[in-house]
Image (spheres, grey):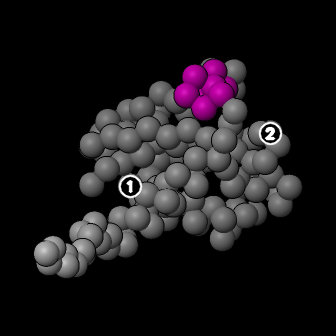
Amino acid sequence: MNNFVYIVTDRNRNSLHVGMSADLIKTLEFYKKMPNLFFDSNQQLSRLVYFEEFKTEEQALSRFKLISRFTRSQKEKMIRSCNPDWIDLTIGLDFEHVMMQKKIDTQVKMSFVGMS
C-alpha cells in the first residue's frame, strides 16, 4: 500500500496544512465533508497543491516530519517547484481513481466482409 505526504490549502492560499495518508482520495473527501474541522468556513482546506508518494509508512512519516518543520516560505517554494500555478491536483487524482475503477474495453470489434 502506498503512503502519501500532502499539502492542502484554502482558495486564498492563507493556510497550508501538511498531512500524511494511506488513502489520499478518502482523506480529501473527508476534508470536503468536514469543511470546518481545522479552520473556519472561509478557510476551508479544499485544494491539494502538493503531494509525494512513498512505498513505506516509515518513509512517509520521515518526510512528513521534515516538511512539517518547514517555514511557510519553504513550503511555498516546494509547491511552486512542481505546481507553479497552485492548481488543485485533486482533479487528476479523481480521474485516475475513476479510470482505475472502470473496466476499459480496449478491444475493437470489426467485422470483415469477404472481398470478391
Measured from the top left, where is residue 69 in percent x and y? 56, 27
Whether residue 2 sits left or right of residue 115 in the image: it is: right
Q: What amino acid is at disc 2?
A: Asn
Is residue 66 depicted above or below 11 in this figure? Answer: above
Give the Cα distance between marks 1 and 2.
26 Å
Q: Could you tell me which residue is drawn at 40 percent across and 64 percent down?
A: 99
- Mark 1 vs mark 2: which is more N-terminal? 2
- On the image, which quarter does residue 115 sit in? bottom left
- On the image, which quarter does residue 56 sit in? top left
Residue 66 visible from this viewpoint: yes
* Chief secondary structure of the magenta portion: helix
Q: Could you tell me which residue is drawn at 58 percent across and 66 percent down?
A: 30
Measured from the top left, where is residue 75 in percent x and y? 62, 27
Label placed on residue 95: none
Instruction: Decide whether residue 83 is among the magenta residues.
Output: yes
> Mark 2: few, some, or many residues within 10 Å (few <14, many ≥20)?
few
**Residue that mark 1 sits on:** 22
Q: Could you tell me which residue is drawn at 44 percent across and 52 percent down?
A: 21
**Residue that mark 2 sits on:** 14
Measured from the top left, where is residue 9 in percent x and y? 70, 45
**Along the line of sight, the residue nearer the viewer: 29 or 85:** 85
Residue 70 visible from this viewpoint: no
Name the quarter where the C terminus is drawn.
Answer: bottom left
The span shown in magenta is 75-84
Whether residue 35 sits left or right of residue 103 in the image: it is: right
CB within 8 Å, label 1 to label 2: no
Q: Could you tell me which residue is drawn at 55 percent across and 33 percent down?
A: 68
**Along the line of sight, the residue nearer the viewer: 92 or 70:** 92
